[in-house]
Image (spheres, helix red, strand yellow):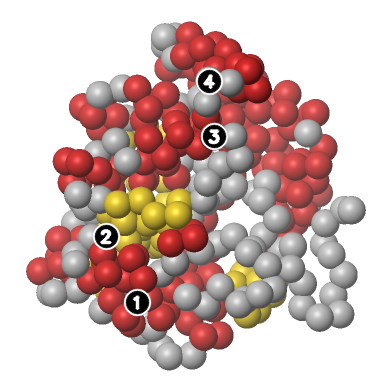
């Protein structure tokens, strides 16, 4: 990671570190303005977000959709500038920036002999949800490697900072489901993300905001195999309080039901419910509708 091809990355991280020495209000201001700049310059991601929001909120006008996209870019870059808290600040400092709701459900269900799966949404503050869980519980979860090994090392290190203390484990997607099942059965909280479009292979189509979306029908099977309850989770930044609110929603009722389409529909609906807590902070720049049912054209610009 110290080879010349990564020197620019390290230089960028040095500049990033210097920014973290500023008051959080100034960091927020910088993030918002970087988001405005990115929204104006990155037309590809801007149009992806605009398409996603227009599909999911058809009642909104074109002007309202564009305003949501601009607000999303601002929220996204602001949260990226907050990662330093998770990477370099002590645990007590991180805890000061996080407020929790619904976390009493974890010990309640554990007392009932149930294991826990946290269904995390791709909000801009998801890393704060991961750290909040891992600071207080032994957690397991799959990790998608970043292309840049320096950034990959930083993010993975941030997610595993409290691993020794709580006994959690991070797995790559190549490790498969078996270690996740084993650790969840042993009592670890499974942190699971299921809202990306991973392609046609192994996917089925289920509605997401009324739009057919390629969905991996794994969560229901994991839940059954681990005798777990599924608690949807979202992390939202509150700029006035300078805090992230990490919220666990009530468990998905009647889940799993044994039918992949019904279970995937319930899962997608629960993800929608989590998104509605802070809609502009969902990661709208991902291609959630890339895979289309047979005969349907792409919804994204080529």
Residue 189: which disc? Answer: 2
Residue 143: tell me if it is visible: yes
Q: Which residue is mark 4?
A: 2
Within 10 angstroms of label 4, few (less than 14), some, or many (20 or more) residues?
A: few
Name the element at disc 1. helix
Point 27% across, 60% down: residue? 189
Discs 4/1, front: 4
Q: Nearer the viewer, mark 1 or mark 3?
A: 3
Closer to the N terminus: mark 4 or mark 1?
Answer: 4
In the figure, residue 161 lies in which quadrant?
top left
Q: Residues within 10 Å of mark 1 (few under 14, many from 20)?
A: some
Say if 213 sits above or below 45 in the image.
Answer: below
Q: Earlier in the sequence, mark 2 or mark 1?
A: 2
Task: Identify the residue position indicated by label 3 in the image.
Answer: 149
**Cα distance, mark 1 to mark 3?**
33 Å
In the image, is 58 to the left or to the right of 236?
Answer: right
User: Real-space Cα distance between discs 4 and 3?
Assistant: 10 Å
- In the rendered image of this protein, does residue 122 appear above or below residue 70? below
Dividing the picture into quadrants, the one containing residue 176 is: bottom left
Q: Nearer the viewer, residue 67 or 6?
A: 6
What residue is drawn where x is 38% and y is 75%? 222
Q: Are marks 3 and 2 in contact (CB under 8 Å)?
A: no
Identify the disc placed on residue 223.
1
**Foreground disc of the pair 4, 2:** 4
Q: Residue 28 location in percent, x, y? A: 51, 21
């Amino acid at each position: 990671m110290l080879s010349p091809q990564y020197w620019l990355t390290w230089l960028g991280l040095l500049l990033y570190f210097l920014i973290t020495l500023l008051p959080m209000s100034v960091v927020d201001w910088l993030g918002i303005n970087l988001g405005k700049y990115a929204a104006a310059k990155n037309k590809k991601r801007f149009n992806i977000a605009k398409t996603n929001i227009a599909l999911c909120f058809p009642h909104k006008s074109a002007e309202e959709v564009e305003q949501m996209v601009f607000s999303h870019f601002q929220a996204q870059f602001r949260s990226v500038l907050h990662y330093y808290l998770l990477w370099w600040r002590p645990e007590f400092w991180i805890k000061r920036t996080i407020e929790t709701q619904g976390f009493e459900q974890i010990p309640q269900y554990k007392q009932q002999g149930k294991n826990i799966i946290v269904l995390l949404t791709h909000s801009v503050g998801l890393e704060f949800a991961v750290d909040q869980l891992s600071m207080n519980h032994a957690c397991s979860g799959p990790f998608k490697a970043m292309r840049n090994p320096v950034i990959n090392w930083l993010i993975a290190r941030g997610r595993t900072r409290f691993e020794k203390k709580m006994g959690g484990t991070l797995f790559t997607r190549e490790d498969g489901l078996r270690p996740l099942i084993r650790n969840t059965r042993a009592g670890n909280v499974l942190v699971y993300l299921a809202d990306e479009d991973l392609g046609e292979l192994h996917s089925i189509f289920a509605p997401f905001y009324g739009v057919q979306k390629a969905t991996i029908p794994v969560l229901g099977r994991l839940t059954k195999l681990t005798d777990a309850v599924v608690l949807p989770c979202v992390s939202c930044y509150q700029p006035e309080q300078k805090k992230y609110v990490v919220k666990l929603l009530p468990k998905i009722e009647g889940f799993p039901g044994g039918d992949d389409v019904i279970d995937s529909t319930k899962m997608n609906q629960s993800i929608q419910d989590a998104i509605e807590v802070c809609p502009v902070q969902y990661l709208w720049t991902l291609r959630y509708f890339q895979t289309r049912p047979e005969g349907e054209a792409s919804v994204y610009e080529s």
